[in-house]
Image: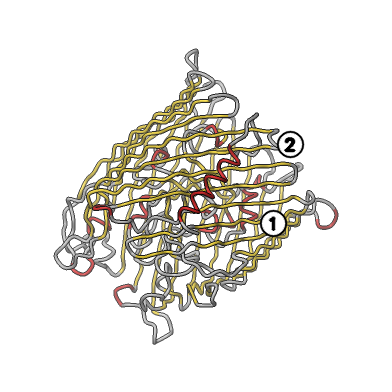
Amino acid sequence: MTPNRFIVATVATFAAQAAVAQDSTTVDPIVINAGQDKVASDVAQSVSVVNQEKLDEIQAANIGDILNQVPGVSGIGSSSPLGQSFNIRGVGAGVTSAASSILTLVDGEELYYESYRQGSIFVEPELLKRVEVLRGPGSSTLYGSGAMGGVVLMETKDARDFLTDGDTFAVRQKLTFESNEDKSQSTTILAFAPDDNFDALFALSYSDIGTSEDGDGNTLIRTNADIANVLAKANYTKGDHRFGVSYQHLYSDGTNQDFNQLDGSATFPWGVGNITTQSQVAKLEHNYSPTDNPFIDLTTSLSYTNSQIDVAQGTIASEPVFASLIGERSYELWKLKTENTADISGAAGEHYLTFGAAVSRKDRTSNPASGSHPEATTDTFEIYALSEFSPTDRLTINTGLRIDHQRVEPADSVTVTSDSTTGTAIEPQISAIYKLNENWNVLGSLARVNRLPTDDEIFDAFSGGAANLDLDPEKGTNTEIGVSYVGSNLFTANDEIDLKFTAFYNDIKDKIVRTNAGAGQPGFDNIDRAIIKGAEIEGRYVVGKFAASMGVTLIDGQGPNGSKLNSIANNSIMLGLSYQFTPEFKMGINSTFAADRTQDRGEFDGYNVHNVYATYSPDRGVLKGTEIHLGIDNIADTTYQPATYLSQAAKGRNIKLSLAKTF
């Protein structure tokens, strides 16, 4: 599809769905993590929600399968669950620490990993119940500085998700099979809640994953791993106090696995190794929310996260891993955080004020020491506040301020310098949404973001490179305007629609890039400027048993001297159609129509990809509690390469079957 035809199709689709009006609708998803809970159309930010129903339909093999359904979000690198990195609105790249421009949190805690040609986050989709994507830098006040692209918030399942009709104990067993990658998976969940005050969950998931192929049968990524996941959670409520503890651990044992999990061995013989990948999240949390005091809703947490990869030589002598890449690399993060939300509403209007502070230490290690993975500690102190004020029923104004101060100190193994560096990020933001009538809202936001340099960018000494202690933080100014609509009884009785359109302009100064300059020169430096601009449309329509969804991404970007940025994704239209034949049986299709994309590194052809699915969930008889999901991704077995992939095609046809039973 040519760019002009693509734009015409986009405008036509938008116009057809926008020329309507009426009342509030149930298709509008609830947004939990962008401040006070609201429906998406009433939030002055670009927020998308993938809930449990959608997760069940997608049957995601990896996090990228989930986020590919969200406008403005693209996967980077590969379909391997161990090669996952993300791009939001043209920010994020698979081979540099630009992954720090996107915050990825699991149950509120940050997971991050950076190492050349490997993924940045390792999470089992089967244990998730909800994913929210806050697009753009205006959403990061509550979560961390430097979120130039946005924030991805993942929530794991809870015990009460499986307990119904007064049950106090439940067991859920699920088996999954996938043709592409020869994947088999077993997931067992135990849920227990003897009363209203206590609940606990234990989940164990085990996967055997092989090799993925493109539509032409070519080998893509040799994951070749046994992956085990454990999730344990418990919550106890006593009066106004709630106590929570949780632990999750992913352990992947790879044999003759591609070292390069982003693009396999397609462009260079990186070799295969016996690779162990681990990801951990542990958390203690206390919430105090007295029912008679609206000024206190105080949560304090202590958390520990760790992402680690240990590479050893594989057994295929003809495909060795470089000696410099052998060993263990990890990121450990300890964080103590306290946050309070005060309801200070009064005669002036509804008003909520959230404020908090946190201290953390990130320890980046490498064994043996490596110039391309410098060891360092990063100590950070954070304070932030977000005000959500509604002086009238029609107007809501959000103002936020975050200040992060960090100190980065190299370990003794760093030979290029022994000096530490400090930096401060000050991030103000303001957004507003105004209700024109019962159906239409207008919205806008302005946010300033500073992404402080990471330890890798400061101390990188690859190929004899020099440290860059004078590296400036990236400075982004993001402007957004938009309109949202909700309505019902449009074309027929009881139909419902919601629609949201957002245009954005992100001006990034002092953008940090890898120089590849060689001996004696900094490995990373600032370039003058990058500008990324675009628009997104997201909408849903429901009538009776029929449902449709739409997502549109229009984006462009340029660097110094008019250069085309290599991080810009394809313009695309995503369409979803489903029909609920009976309360137990549903079928649907999700399609992506992507346009051509020109980057400095080459031309990327457009593509059309279609995923179909069917679900059967009987609610009576001996099969009550059973769920059967059948899906075929890329049903036409198309070979294509998204513009955000480094060198490889995406995965070809993949037939997925899952059987689940809750007892």
Left or right position of 517 against 552 = left
Outermost residue, top side: 347
Image marks 1 and 2: residues in contact by CB distance under 8 Å: no
Quadrant assignment, res 325: bottom left
Q: Earlier in the sequence, mark 1 or mark 2?
A: 1
Q: Which residue is mark 2?
A: 492
Picture coordinates of residue 661, whole percent (x, y): 73, 58
Please give the label number shown on residue 172. 1
Q: Residues within 10 Å of mark 1 (few under 14, many from 20)?
A: some
Say which quadrant the C terminus sits in. Answer: bottom right
Q: How many marks?
A: 2
Picture coordinates of residue 253, whole percent (x, y): 49, 71
Q: Nearer the viewer, residue 94 or 18?
A: 18
Q: Residues within 10 Å of mark 2 (few under 14, many from 20)?
A: few
Picture coordinates of residue 480, whole percent (x, y): 41, 37
Which residue appears at 73% of the width and 35% of the height? 494
Which residue appears at 40% of the width and 73% of the height? 259
Element class at badge 2: loop
Please give the label number shown on residue 113. none
Q: Is residue 290 visible?
A: yes
Picture coordinates of residue 185, whole percent (x, y): 62, 66
Amino acid type indicated by mark 1:
Arg
